[in-house]
Image (spheres, helix red, strand yellow):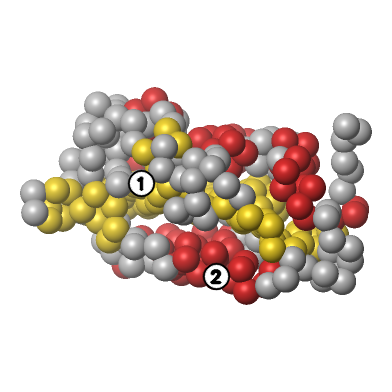
Amino acid sequence: MNFKKIIPLTFAALSVAGALSACSDSSVVGADSQDNSVAIGSSSSVTPGSSGSLGEWIFKEKSAMAALRSVSKGTAVTYSHTAGCVGCYQTDSVTAHETFDGVTQSIIDFDPTVRYSDTTRDSRSNVYLAMKDEEGFLHGEIFSSFGVNFKEVNCLIEQEGFNTLYQVYFNGKSAPNYLPNKAFKYLMSADFTLIEEFKKDCILENGEVGGFDGDVQVACIVNSEEVNGVETYKDPYWDKYAKYIIDNCVSTKSLNEFWFPIE
């Protein structure tokens, strides 16, 4: 089996689009994996200046930028959209760190179970988060999305030209890349130590690793099990990779160093 040709970059493009437009908690609907499958190729599939870049986010997410620039240096502020908060964003400059830590912990604590669903378009819940700390540095933008048959966490700050992404999901049976009784995991990161760790974790699960040595993209096919008649996979490493992505989603520039478009 040529693994490189069957691993889908299922929700990567959807993640960025969702992060920029996700206002609804329970009714944000995107194309399913059947419609978005592309094979893992070279790292050129993600390029600096793409929609995952901080510059694009600043340009498009004016409400977030206004919130993060609403307080002076020396005061932290968090801007967030949480699961259960339909169509609303919240700004907190009083307990910014506590809010940031609480929302990120909720992502880490997601139930790491995915279940196969025949639904071709799945409603999803979204969590969106960004904080400017007292020194003016950005933590986030972090975007996480989850539904019945998938979960993902995404740092949209570019690191060495790439955003960091971790996904766990099932492919639909009509997808060309569908494999029975198999779940998929996908990691994109410029941290090659993390990439190697992901490969080792995949092997420990008796999974099959795909991708290119030294590349920023790698995937893993793991066995699922039938639970009450439903294909089910519980990811033992969700909290590990979610925490890594969140902890390292910090800009090396302060907010005032970025270029802002003229209104």
SS state under label 2: helix
Is residue 45 visible in the rendered image? The answer is yes
The quarter of the picture where residue 252 lies is bottom right
Q: Residue 24, how many percent across, how many down?
A: 49, 41
109 to the left or right of 101: left
229 to the left or right of 14: left
Mark 1 belongs to which amino acid? Gly
Front one among 20 and 222 = 20
Mark with earlier residue (1, 2): 2
Which-is-in-front pick, marks 1 and 2?
A: 2
Front one among 154 and 200 = 154
SS state under label 1: loop
Q: Residue 112, how many percent across, how many down?
A: 34, 61
Q: Residue 166, how many percent across, how many down?
A: 48, 53
Q: Which residue is mark 1?
A: 147
The quarter of the picture where residue 123 lies is top left
Residue visible at 69% across and 63% down in the picture:
92
Is residue 42 visible in the rendered image? The answer is no
Q: Which mark is residue 102?
A: 2
Q: Is residue 191 above or below residue 95?
A: above
Q: Is residue 18 above or below residue 129?
A: above
Mark 2 belongs to which amino acid? Gly
Front one among 62 and 254 = 62
**Image quarter hosting the N terminus:** top left
Residue visible at 80% across and 63% down in the picture:
137
